[in-house]
Image (tube, coloured by chain):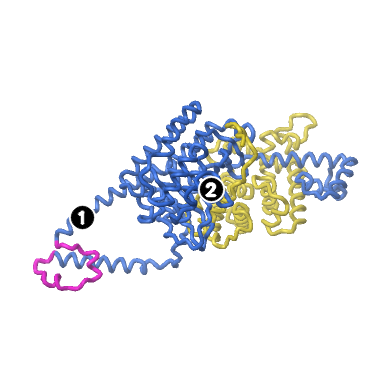
Amino acid sequence: MSRARAGDIVAPAAPLPDVEAALVLRAQQGDESAFALLMDRNLDRIWALVWRVMRHREDTEDVVQDAFLAAWRSLPGFRGDARFSTWLQTIAVSRALNYRARGAERVRRASASFAAAGDPAFEAARAVSGGALAAAGSASPREPADDRPGASPMRLLESRELRQRLAACLEKLPTEWRAILALREGEASLSYEQIATTLGLALGTVRSRLARARLSLRDCVEGES
Amino acid sequence: MKPGGRADHPVELLSASIDRELRPAESAALETHLEACAECRGLLGDFRRLDEAITSEPVPPVPAGLEERILLELPSRRSPAPPRRFWRQAMPLAAAASLVMAVLLWYERPDRLPMLLESSPATATDAVAPAAPKAGLPEARSDAPAASSRSMDAGANANEMKKSDEMRIVTNVPGPPGATAPAPPPALQKGFAARRQAEPHAESAPPAQDQWKVEPGPAPAASAPQGAGRANEEQEAMRLAAQLEAARVPQEAARAVAPAAAAPAAPAPASAAAEIEMAGKQEDRLETDKTALTLTLLPLCAGSPAPILRRGEPGRAAAAAARPASLPFALLASPYAVRLEPDHRLHMERGDYACTVVIDDPDGRTIAAALDESMRRSAVSPVTAEQPAAACLVEATPAAHQAVVRLIQERYRGAIEKTCGALPN
């Protein structure tokens, strides 16, 4: 058998679902270290997903913690019909929506910052967020960045101010729409069918809500709503 | 596009089209519509830009310590007893303390009756009262600082381990029918935090299981005194570091180094399986480490020293025949899951990221040696008849973790990232 040279990138070997399955099995038997490894493999993704739904750092932390604890408690009943990561996503989104429904975040939001403390990118974003938030709700939202004649905000989305406007518009969306967007356009990148399964919705509902969410966002950024 | 005019435009189809979720008929209809509708073409472009902007929106980093906080909150599933009220928990302790105090006071009395002690039947208090009057008390007291000192040592070890305790080796090996196995060792039962406090094997390995004798080579840590754990760790780190360095020199030179490290002089094998395993090692080590590792792994994970191969069948073909259909092991070297294939393909994954790179022979030895050493030194959870596909979760040593991650990040990073994209952190 001719050997490839060291450093060659070759046809992928079989993926490693057995690693996840092995860890799940151990965790189901009560092995906390196996669960720690599962968490290690999924934490970044779950954190990003929940943040895209909650858009608030402390609320995200609460929900992520709650989701992993719920997963630990429910693991004995996990039958492996779906991948563990998919199952975990379902729990996380469900917890995020419930958290929103309880309204606990509204109390906290009154006194907490939007930005992630200590993160330079977010501190910088925080510095301009006041103007962007005002711009998103003002009668003339194009003022901050639209200095090119004829350029629409949608075409200038790469600018920081408009990204902040987008962030503000995302916050104004109904949470359920944001959850669909997070599952579709975030790290999860699920298909419509997977989103429908995750959220317990009809396929058509997913499709129509995504369209409405995008249209609302587009209008918000353009200043039409 | 004005709000009033949207009813005439297929917004839903436009949205679904950027997600590639259109049926063929819908796709054709949309194409036709787009040719005639400039507004929809504009909206489609806007949707795409939105899509990119949302996807690339920065997400705050995961807060430091969140994982640890979650782990601390995990309710144990090993002790399902419902929580008791405080006084119900404290009562037995208070009663025991009172009893001990009473006995100690009684010992201190000058007018106590020695005959009473000699003739009294054994009671529960015998377990806590010193066997010899007075002499026992100072001993008990002098134990306290010793215990405290041990506890501090454990804490220091925990800190030491915590720095690099991020690697596990996960294996999936079907067990033999009817195989009976010891209970999972404490190191695997205590959980993440407790495991960091324990020396990897001195406390956790089953004491008299033949499976621990199957693997020949240096004396297993299970039989070494506890104090030797750190020294072994350092030796292992030096050995793996030397191997890693050897992998950087020309291959011929590395060949001279690697076998000595990977196949140390072994004592007489403890069983037939060990003999076979050794034969497999001697014949296959230079050809492929995977074969030898498979031979090593199967008896360990099966929880039985029963030979996997028949005598006279060492080598790749026999090992392949004995190997289960699914590949039996992978390294989980945080942040990557890594698997070494028999043909020196190293497959790595992290979430959706996956890449397979061919690695050098000496590097294969490095990973193989890391796995081999970790297998020897870690507690292997058994496979039972009820759980034939149960995973063998083996904790690798910090030095092994360092060696493997360095190999990936320093030696193959360029090749991997060139084709597969940036390595996830």
Which residue occupies 90% across, 41% down?
B36
Residue at numbered disc 2:
B318
Residue B141, numbered circle: 1
Count of numbered labels shown in the rendering: 2
Q: Extreme top residue here?
A: B250
Which residue occupies 37% across, 47% down?
B199
| Residue type of the residue flagged with mark 1 | Arg
Residue B240 location in percent, x, y? 43, 36
The stretch in magenta equals B108-133
In the image, is residue B113 part of the stretch drawn in magenta?
yes
Residue A164 location in percent, x, y? 66, 39
Front-lying residue, A200 or A116: A200
Front-lying residue, B409 or B338: B338
Front-lying residue, B132 or B45: B132
Mark 2 residue crowding within 10 angstroms, few (<14) / some (14–19) / many (20+):
some
Residue B383 visible in image: yes
The chain assigned the colour blue in the figure is B
- The secondary structure type at the circle numbered 1 is helix
In the image, is residue A168 part of the stretch drawn in magenta?
no
Quadrant of the image for the C terminus of chain B? top right
| N-terminal label among 1 and 2 | 1
The chain assigned the colour yellow in the figure is A
Q: Chain of mark 2?
A: B
